Each structure stands twice: as C-alpha cells, then as structure tokens.
Amino acid sequence: MNKIPHLLEAAGIELEYVIVNEEDLSIKPIADKILKSATREIVQEVEFGNIAWSNEFTLHVIEIKTIGPQSLFSGLDALLFEQARLINALLKPFQARLLPGGTHPFMEPKSETKLWPYGNREIYDTYERIFGCRNHGWSNLQSTHLNISFNGDEEFARLHAAVRLVLPLIPALCASTPVIGGKPSGWLDTRLVYYAQNQSKIPSIPGAIIPEPGIRSRQEYEERILHPMYKDIAVFDKKGLLQEEWLNSRGAIARFERSAVEIRIIDSQECVQAEIAVCGFITEVIRALVEERWIDFDKQLNWKNAGLVKIYRDTLKQGMATGIADCAYLAVFGYKGQKGACTAGQLWRHLMQTVLPEKNEKFKKWRQTFEIILSEGNLAQRIMAALNKGYSRKRIIDVYRKLAAALQDDRLFISQKRIKKEGLAEFAHKL
C-alpha cells in the first residue's frame, strides 16, 4: 500500500490544452486519434512513467497530468514540458498543434462541440442531458488543477481553511481568458464567469465557488457539501452516475479518494514553466497560512464567506488592479500598507517577497516568472496588450499563434521591449 503524503508534502498537477488546426487555429476534435497514436488503440489514458495523458469532456481537449503525488521541485516542469512536445509531434501529421489559455478565442460551442464518445461517455451524456453542455460554460474551458496533499482530518481542516482564504486572489494572478466568441468579453477571467453559471440549475453544486467555512472533518464536509448536492441531482440522475466527489464544482474541492484538496480556478497559462511557477507560488502562500505565520487556524477556519466572494468576483474583472480595502483580509497575509488598502497586484508582490525569499535559490526561477506577471500583468492582460484593440479574426489568430509557440518553446509571453531590455531571450517568447 502506498504511503499517503502528509500536509503539503506533495502535489498533483493537471494541465488542459486545446487541440487546434495549425494554420487557422480552429478547434480540431482529434484527442482520440492522438491517444491512439501513442498506444495503437483508443484509450482514455496513457502513462509515461510519472506522467499521463488523458481525455477530457470534449474531443478537442487533452490533459497532461502527474500520476500520484509528486514534489514541485523534482524536475516536474521538465517532465510535463517533454510530454507537451511529444503531443505536438504526434499532432504534426494531422496539421494540428496545442493551444494554451483557458478558453479558445473564437470557438462556436453550439456547432463545434463533440463530446468524448468512448469509455465514460454515459457520464458525459448525463451531464449533457441535465445541463446542456454545448456552450462556453462546458465545452470551452481549460484549466490547471493543483492537488495539494493532506493526511487525516486535522490536516484536511487546516488545508481547506487556508485554501479558502487564497482563492479570491488566484484570478488576479492567473486570468488568461479575456477573449471569447471572437471579441473581448469585458472580463479578464471569462472562463470563471461561465464556470460559476454552468450548473446554476442545481445551485448546491457550485455553491458560492468559495467553499463553506468551519469544516473540520471529512464527515462534516460530506454532510454539509456533498450530500446536499447528491440529493439535489438525484432527481435528474436516476442511475446515480454523478454521485461522486468530483460532482462538486466549488473553486476548491476535497478529493478524499486521493487525500488532496484540488484547486480548480487556475486558468491554463501560456507554457509549462508558468504553470508550475503559479502552482508553486500558490502552494507556498498556503503553506505560510497553514503554519499560522500571520493568523491562527481558528480564525482561518471561521472566516466568513461574504468578503471572500466579493474580492473573488472583483478579481475576475479587474485582475491585478482590483482594490482590496478590507484591512482584516490584508492582515491575513501580513500586509500593512498605508491605511490598510492595496491592489491585488501589490498584495501578490508582498507575498512574493515574503514566501519566495531571494536568498532561497530554489525559488529563483519562480521569482523571475512573477516579476514578469506582476509588472506586465496576468496572461489575460498581456493578451489584451498584444491585441492592442485589434479584434479581427486575423489579429486574434496572429496573437494566439504566438501563444501556441510559447507553449511549444516553454517561454513566457511578454513584450519584445522587455526581452531586449532585460536579456530574457532564453526565458520568454515575444508578444
């Protein structure tokens, strides 16, 4: 029997990318063909050592993920990048490639969605029957899932409490979805706007996205969160196919089957090094909370949802520029700015300086990534800067083709001016 890692000892990463036509970046629903290319048969998952590829809800998305819990410092970025390159090599004969980012910029879900037709298709068909999945809220969403380990009720309660407090800040750091349906949506994190709406037919499933406070055990979590949604969906799910913990679509969910809390609100980034840096940074902030660096566990546990939900919703639209005037919330992270108010970007910079100290060499690469994000904006803001108010199909394709190249080369997506100024040619891909 495998040993269960303790609190924050290990992590699991899941990266979702869109398969697109190499020339015009239209979606290409051939995930089944790529998995078959790797195994000579249609499967839902293929393993390569500690990494696997798997299908997703639709045929135009493929997932690269870790197998079991691993250390973020064990060369995981190189392993995941290698698999992204292998998939792109298999896509080449199909005149296709992987596209990063949390939404496809001009997909038309109503006419283009093709659900995965094999294996677990009955589950997907059930979702389609209940919610109607040929829309942006279901078939045009790509995310990075971060699973953080715990062992037992006490560790679960501490982890869950800490994660709740960090969730409102994640869209400011990770938003990558400002364009949908061929035009800007008015939101930096459009994916999460749709994510909150896609199961509104049964409100107990998404809840308020920020999970409920005060949960101390698995039993309490099941009673307060899982059982109500199982009851509510049973009216539509007579066979009980969806009576599983993954039905829960809060921003972070308990995965007791793998002894982890899974964070689901990280938009897919432009390259693997950015994905791992984001996951690492978020994990270190959570670690500081678990260690009670700024406030004690009981205060974390019982922190009310209303203020967290407001900050979260503001960051979907305003990103790093989101103003946070809640002095008590800022104190959660040890921030003591003038009159207690700051922007989400300023708070993330404070956290970088606090939990990713320069003297610690293992954080060097992550800090380089965050210096870019904190000065030039999250990926959504950098995409909008690159588009420069030009939203023709040709302009969108040009910018997103560079995003695809960033994934292929594992380079950050930043301005040419900054690359030249700071000598970042080996680190970044130009806008």
Image (cartoon, grey):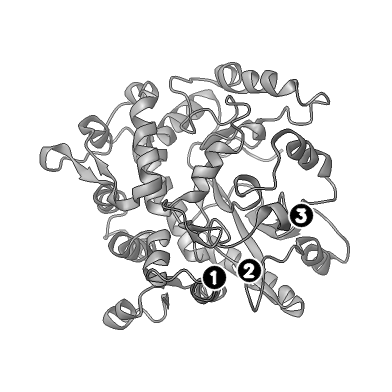
Instruction: Say what secondary structure mark 2 lies in.
Output: strand
Q: Position of residue 309 (x, y in %)?
A: 39, 32
Q: Earlier in the sequence, mark 2 or mark 1?
A: 2
Q: Residue at x 35, y 41 (%)?
A: 314
Position of residue 13 measured from the top left corner of the image (x, y, whole percent): 57, 51
* Marks 3 & 2, CB-CB < 8 Å contact: no
Q: Is residue 207 above or below residue 400?
A: above
| Between 364 and 14, the one nearer to me in the picture | 14
Q: Quadrant of the C terminus?
A: bottom left
Q: Are marks 3 and 1 in contact (CB under 8 Å)?
A: no
Q: Nearer the viewer, residue 225 or 1?
A: 225
Question: Are the two marked residues, 2 and 1, in contact with CB atoms closer than 8 angstroms?
Answer: yes
Judged from the image, the secondary structure of the residue bearing numbered disc 3 is loop
User: Residue 407, which numbered label?
Assistant: 1
Q: Nearer the viewer, residue 257 or 230?
A: 230
Three-letter code for the amino acid on which mark 1 is drawn: Leu
Circle 3 residue:
114
Residue 104 image position (x, y, % from top left): 58, 60
Mark 3 residue crowding within 10 angstroms, few (<14) / some (14–19) / many (20+): some
Residue 261, can we see it? no
Position of 167 relative to 350 (above/below): above
CA–CA distance in space, label 3 to label 2: 17 Å
Mark yes or no: residue 203 visible: yes
* Residue highlighted by disc 2: 98
Give the left or right position of residue 110, taking residue 289 as reference: right
Q: Amino acid at mark 3?
A: Lys
> Which is in the foreground here, disc 3 or disc 1?
3
Q: Residue furthest front?
A: 392
Quadrant position of residue 20: bottom right
